């Protein structure tokens, strides 16, 4: 799949507010678009930038960490502790 499935998706307003991991676990289309989303050194930088451009995520941001002479795409949380608590789901 070459085209980001979020481009014409009606769920963008909902997905924009999801935590990074939940976004991929909830949508098989975006997981198929970027199957290595959870392996830091295998994340597709171009696809990540496309997803961020479309979603403009509320609770996470993406950056390239170049420490220790390596290039790792890092996703970090940018909300408050209360936001995080409200986002986390109970495991049953």
Image: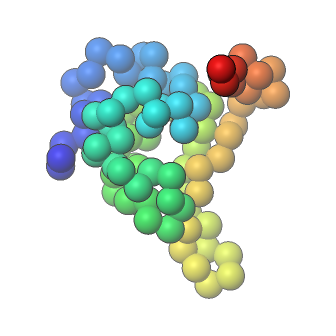
Could you tell me which quadrant the C terminus lies in?
A: top right
Q: Residue furthest right?
A: 81
Which residue is painted at 65% across and 47% down in the image? Answer: 76
Q: Position of residue 54 (x, y in %)?
A: 36, 33
- The figure's colour scheme reads rainbow
**41 relative position to 88: left or right:** left
Q: Residue furthest left?
A: 2
Residue situated in front as seen by the camera: 2 or 65: 2
Q: Position of residue 62 (x, y in %)?
A: 55, 50
Q: Residue furthest bottom?
A: 69
Which residue is painted at 28% across and 45% down in the image? Answer: 33
| Position of 25 relative to 64 (above/below) | above
Q: Taking the image as drawn, is residue 72 in sight?
A: yes
| Position of 78 relative to 34 (above/below) | above
Q: Position of residue 79 (x, y in %)?
A: 71, 30
Q: Taking the image as drawn, is residue 56 in sight?
A: no
**1 relative position to 42: left or right:** left
Residue 46, by quadrant, is bottom left
Residue situated in front as seen by the camera: 6 or 38: 38
Numbered marks: total: 0
Which residue is painted at 44% across and 65% down in the image? Answer: 42
| Position of 31 relative to 55 (above/below) | below
Which residue is painted at 50% across and 59% down in the image? Answer: 39
């Amino acid at each position: 799949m070459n085209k980001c499935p979020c481009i014409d998706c009606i769920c963008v307003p909902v997905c924009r507010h999801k935590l990074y991991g939940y976004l991929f676990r909830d949508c098989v289309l975006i997981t198929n678009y970027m199957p290595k989303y959870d392996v830091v050194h295998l994340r597709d930088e171009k696809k990540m930038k496309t997803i961020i451009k479309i979603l403009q995520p509320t609770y996470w941001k993406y950056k390239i960490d170049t420490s220790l002479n390596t290039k790792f795409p890092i996703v970090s949380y940018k909300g408050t502790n209360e936001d995080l608590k409200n986002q986390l789901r109970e495991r049953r």
